Image: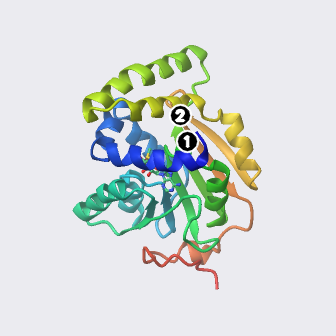
Amino acid sequence: MTPEEKRPFVQRLFSRIAPRYDWFNRLASFGLDQRWRRAAVVRGGIAPGQRILDVCTGTGDLAVLCARRYGAAVGIDMNREMLGRARRKSRAKRLPIGWVQGDAEALPFPSETFDRVVIGFSTRNLSNLTQGLTDMVRVLRPGGQLLILETGYPSNPLLRVGYQLFLFTVARLIGFLLTGRLWPFTYLARSVKQFLTPPQMIDRLQRLDTQVEYVPLSHGLASLYVAAKIGPKPDADCAADGQHSILEVTSCRP
Ligand SMILES: C[S@@+](CC[C@H](N)C(=O)[O-])C[C@H]1O[C@@H](n2cnc3c(N)ncnc32)[C@H](O)[C@@H]1O
């Protein structure tokens, strides 16, 4: 699939499965997906007062988690149906989250705006991964971190084969039972199988001038990459100056 074909395909896919997306995640991961999101924000050193951007936020679980724990967040996604679900969650929980419909590969924010950029289970879905990663690093302040949570690549070959078998059988069946469609879940299983290995992902990130740490979660069933943008750390008084308005996304440097 070319990048030009992939974007409308991914749009159509998430529009179709949006109403059942959270159910699919919980059931197909036996509830581990939320544990992985929590591990990502804890490992990523997210703290109150930081400006946090959740890229490809989907139904907003990562943004909601960040806002609940740390005060506020901004979530961006290109899909209206997925964002609609996200918006409902933040309204129900009265969380200060700014939702933006937009493109992860051309983020509508000035450079060096955020302290943390998170992206969950979505780098596989970008049409142009390098362009997306480059833009995520661009909007990070020097010293800020890009936290990438992805489906995993167990280092144990037996576990890896079992995991991929699971995705093509049980996970597809769960998806079909929830949505009456098989093709979105065939794509999801294939996208996991064909995605970059951890050394390949680390290499991509290092080329963007980041210092990368790879953290396998649940024996490698999920992967967390913590990529720190090389450069001076944010001013101490800036990081500590408490709550920011969610859409006040300009850098707090003068
Ligand atoms: C698997 S969902 C991820 C949901 C969420 N991050 C989570 O933790 O469950 C992938 C999301 O990426 C979004 N997406 C894919 N390509 C995108 C792009 N170029 N710009 C913005 N959103 C994109 C899709 O619309 C979809 O909502």
Mark 1 in CB contact with mark 2 (< 8 angstroms):
yes
Q: Secondary structure at mark 1?
A: helix
Q: Which mark is residue 191?
A: 2
Q: Position of residue 193 (x, y in %)?
A: 56, 28
Residue at the (59%, 58%) spot, across then down: 105
Residue at the (55%, 52%) spot, across then down: 44
Residue at the (56%, 78%) spot, across then down: 250
Residue pointed to by mark 1: 124
Relative to 79, say whether 152 is above or below: above
Mark sitting earlier along the chain (1/2) = 1
Q: Position of residue 11 (x, y in %)?
A: 43, 50
Q: Position of residue 173 (x, y in %)?
A: 33, 24
Q: Looking at the image, can residue 148 be seen? A: no
Q: Which mark is residue 207?
A: none
**Which of the pair 152/103 is nearer the observer?**
103
Q: Looking at the image, can residue 33 be seen? A: yes
Distance, label 1 to label 2, CA atoms, is 6 Å
